[in-house]
Image (tube, rainbow, N blue to C red):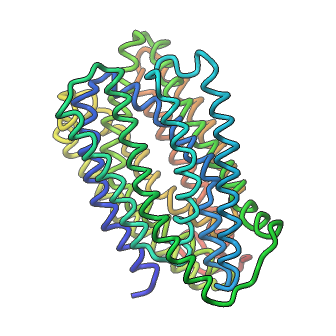
Amino acid sequence: MNKFIRGTLILIAAAFLSECVEFLVNMKLASELKEEGMGLYMSVMPVLFLILILASLELPISVSKYIAEHKQETHLSLLKHALKLGVLSTVLFSLLTAAAVSIPSTFSKFPAHIHWLLFALIPIAAFSAVARGYFMGIQQMSKIAVSNLLRKCAQFLLLYFIFNLFDYPLEISLLVALGALVASELLVLLYLFSMFVVHLKGLKAVRYYELSGKQARAKLLSVSLPTVGLRIFQAFVNAVQPFLIQMTLIRAGFTAVTATEHFGMLMGVAMSIGFFPAFIAHSLMVALIPNVSDAYARLERDRLSNLLHQSMWLTLLYGTVSVFIMHLFAEELSAMFFSSPVAAHYLKQLWPFFLFHFFMIPLQAYLIGVGLIKDAFLHSIWANAFAFGAVFVLGSMPSLHMDGVILGMNFGAVLQALLHYFTVCKRIGVRVWFVPRSGEL
């Protein structure tokens, strides 16, 4: 069994367990926060993810890509410079976060002390990113798998014990929910960084080549900056989406509270269920980046074609089965969160969105591996601009409202996945059904 298959299977197994725990987390949150609280929780999550992306500088991607492509002699020097970038990132984004939270209206609808959680996230994200990238690059996927499972288990246990021991009002409950997430990220940092320090000592024991700071930064930032740009845009889309959907529903005749409740059912219930199988897509993404980067650096065209073939057929297999099951048992699955037929209807209507997102995630990893990050960025801009326009126009119609919102989201996902796929096929020189042709590498 090759490294790609073995690493992917390890990640999938751990991710499945993690998603099972995540399901329990969302059920616990739904029972404690109710419809309005879930709407607020889902509205603040994109902000937290944006901070995680910015503070990490997408170093997991750039470090893993470099480690996979280059000899061991340069690894130690690069990692030292990556840690210095982590320190710089912590200082810079702590200052920017302080400036943002000083604006009175920025977090007015969220718990009063949320800014302390934001500050805590920044160093956690910056330093765990370096360790995560290193283990991805050397394809020790078991450590990545354990860290992912540890995060979800810690979050659930904290929520379970705190909410069972105490009864809080909505504002404090929101703060507890967000605090549990940050605490779980801290535990992951402690685990990964302890393993990382052991590996650094091992690298010091062998002969290594010292990179200059300029060289190391150039290598890391040549991948990190465009990837951060892509992730910032995606996070921006996720941050704007709650306000766009709620504003669109109000234009269609919903009250502000009703719009928030329906958004909570869409994101907290339908999306939680629909993205459950995406742990396989994310496992593929983590395994694909170092493997594709290595194969592309060595100009191994057959290996690139095989990696694409394997990942696409695996996605087609689990994706079609997943959306069929979700459509068939939508009412039963939704009832695990809220006893609402509306959430089940949303889940059924979103099947194209989920299926094409399953394809989109490994394809984006493939684009990063073959050096087409800019193309991935442009695809995201075009697809989301189209989706937002469709959501606004269709969702504002009183006859469609939420159905119009969902149609717009479906259109955007299909467009972005197709753009990714045809671009990958062109770059590695295969036709859409993996028939070889003359093409560039």
In the image, what residue occupies the spot 67% across and 49% down? 89
- Residue 290 percent across, percent down from the top left: 57, 74
**Which quadrant holds the N terminus?**
bottom left
Image quarter in which the C terminus is found: bottom right
Farthest bottom residue? 207
Res 168 seen here: yes
Of the pair 344 and 76, the residue shown nearer to us: 76
Residue 251 vs residue 42, the one in the foreground: 42
Image spot of residue 197 (x, y percent): 52, 71
Res 393 visible: no
Residue 178 higher or lower than 257, as above or below = below
Considering depth in this image, is 372 or 312 the residue closer to the camera?
372
Q: Which residue is drawn at 52% across and 28% down?
A: 391
Query: Is residue 397 left or right of 225 when viewed as pictured?
Result: left
Residue 72 x/y as whole percent: 64, 85
| Most foreground residue, 239 or 319 | 239
Residue 178 occupies quadrant: top left
- In the picture, measured across the screen, residue 327 lies left or right of residue 286, that is left
Q: Residue at x 64, y 27 (%)?
A: 100
Q: Where is residue 431 in the image (x, y as percent from the top left)?
A: 60, 72
For the image shown, how many numbered marks are present on the structure? 0
Res 162 quadrant in image = top left
Q: Residue at x 51, y 41 (%)?
A: 120
